[in-house]
Amino acid sequence: MGKLVGRFSEKKMLQSALETDRSELIAVYGRRRVGKTFLIRQVYEGRILFELSGLHNGSLRDQLTNFQQRLASKGSELKRPATWLEAFSQLEHYLSGLKTKKKKVIFIDEFPWLASRRSKFMMAFENFWNSYATRRSDLVVVICGSAAAYMVQNIIRNRGGLHNRVTRRLRLLPFDLHETQLFLRSKSIRYSAYDILQLYMAIGGIPQYLENLVVGESVAQAIDRLCFIKDAPLRTEFRDVFASLYEQPERHSAIVRTLGKSRRGLTRNEVSAKTKIPTGGMLTRTLEELEESGFIERYSAFRNVKKDALYRLSDEYSLFYLKFIENSPSKESGTWLKQYTSHAYRSWVGFSFETVCLKHVRQIKAELGIAEVASDNYSWVQKGGDEGAQIDLVIDRADNVINLCEMKFYNAPFAIDKSYAAEIMHKRDAFQESTNTSKNLFVTLVTTFGLKRNAYSLQLVQNQLEIACLFKA
């Protein structure tokens, strides 16, 4: 990758750690290929005085040899340490000999690979931070890992020597549509908003996936090359990414596969019943790990934070893989173009567009002019299991309005016909009756190219938004 694109709030947070009068311990985590290492190196360019990256499946001897080599590159002629306590003692000696008074960045990448069982790395790191780093005011220690579950459980929620020691945490998520557009432009790739949206719905906003795009290809050609032809780089990514993130990925994969079959989403109990994972601590931990890694999202039921919350598959690539790539026998170009008229395509594109919109609620609120209005977001499903009466995005506002949001992906201005008008009225009336709300109900449509003006749109729709609003910063 070249120049850092987007990541505005993340850059601001990391840069601000250089301005404080204390040492900072920053935990950075997110799924692999999301750009964690690149972000840290770019923001702290010229300020990283020591960098160490864990070796995947490396033995203790391998890891300590790697540490020695990294420190030796700084001019320190030291023997290979026998333990991590000795290694961090050598690092302390090196740092104490530096004359600069500026903040110094220590970057430890792939932290979980270093902290293997019986390595005593965590004990030594805790000692380094508590006994040395906190006595200084000029260190920024960044620890980074792709295994989000490990980082949350063992660092963020640490109950030992690092309890409440992390001063800043950064969960790095994929690019949103605005950042995706900026990234493509930095590569001189200029797609329309509609085409970028189609690309995003297939592979998401993972920078490393987007890095594979080249100038001169249509979106359909790019998806063919990345996902379907022989040796396509994303053809086996689904299996590889779960294997790299979790020690026992079978449960995680089972939940993702199960959610991929449900457009409505599933409650915790439904997930348990369909995957045969008992509804206990194991299920809780697995759902949390998937949520922290950005594969699934939990949407609270209307005005109820926990009860009846729905879990949905929110990772675009995983949904696309399960729907089209996994069982595709073709390894020839043109595979994706042949899908455009299929029922599977229409089903997928509708669900995926809803998912993308749910990730851009901030932009939707801004376009509605309610960015400064206190509001909460919910999902709503009519009691009794009527899947026809579901609203994926309900914006409950403090100014006596509730937006009932419908998302429609279409390749032209969308026309509300008699059948869909009846569906909208049914949802609105069912919501009114079920919630007994006294607030004004505004039907809000988010579409690709707007609404055709007709009697139904004039009668039923209070707000209409086009995809251009999703691309705003």
Image (cartoon, rainbow, N blue to C red):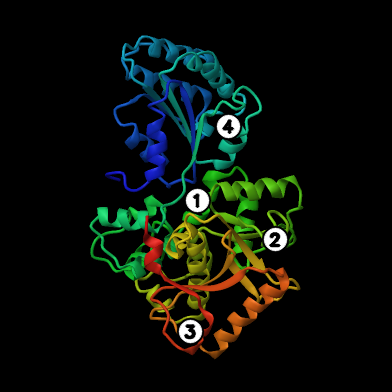
Residue 432: x %, y % from top left: 68, 73
SS at mark 4 in the image: helix
Mark earlier in primary sequence (3, 2): 2
Residue 133: x %, y % from top left: 48, 17
State the residue at coordinates (61%, 32%): 154
Q: Tell which tag, 4 or 3, sits nearer the viewer.
A: 3
Mark 4: amino acid: Ile
State if disc 4 and disc 1 touch (CB < 8 Å).
no
State the residue at coordinates (59%, 25%): 162
State if disc 4 and disc 2 touch (CB < 8 Å).
no
Mark 2: amino acid: Thr
Mark 1: amino acid: Asp
- For the question of whether residue 263 can be seen, the reply is no
Give the residue number, with chain letter if any, for mark 4: 155
Is 342 left, or right, of 120 in this rendering? left
**For residue 438, above or below residue 143:** below
State if disc 2 and disc 3 touch (CB < 8 Å).
no
Label 3 environment density (alpha carbons within 10 Å; few <14, some 14–19, many ≥20) = few
Mark-to-mark CA distance, 3 and 2: 36 Å
The residue lying toward the viewer, choosing from 189 and 328, is 189
Mark earlier in primary sequence (1, 2): 1
Is 10 left, or right, of 314 in this rendering? left
Per the rendering, the mark at residue 458 is 3
The residue lying toward the viewer, choosing from 70 and 123, is 123
Label 1 environment density (alpha carbons within 10 Å; few <14, some 14–19, many ≥20) = few
State the residue at coordinates (26%, 53%): 186
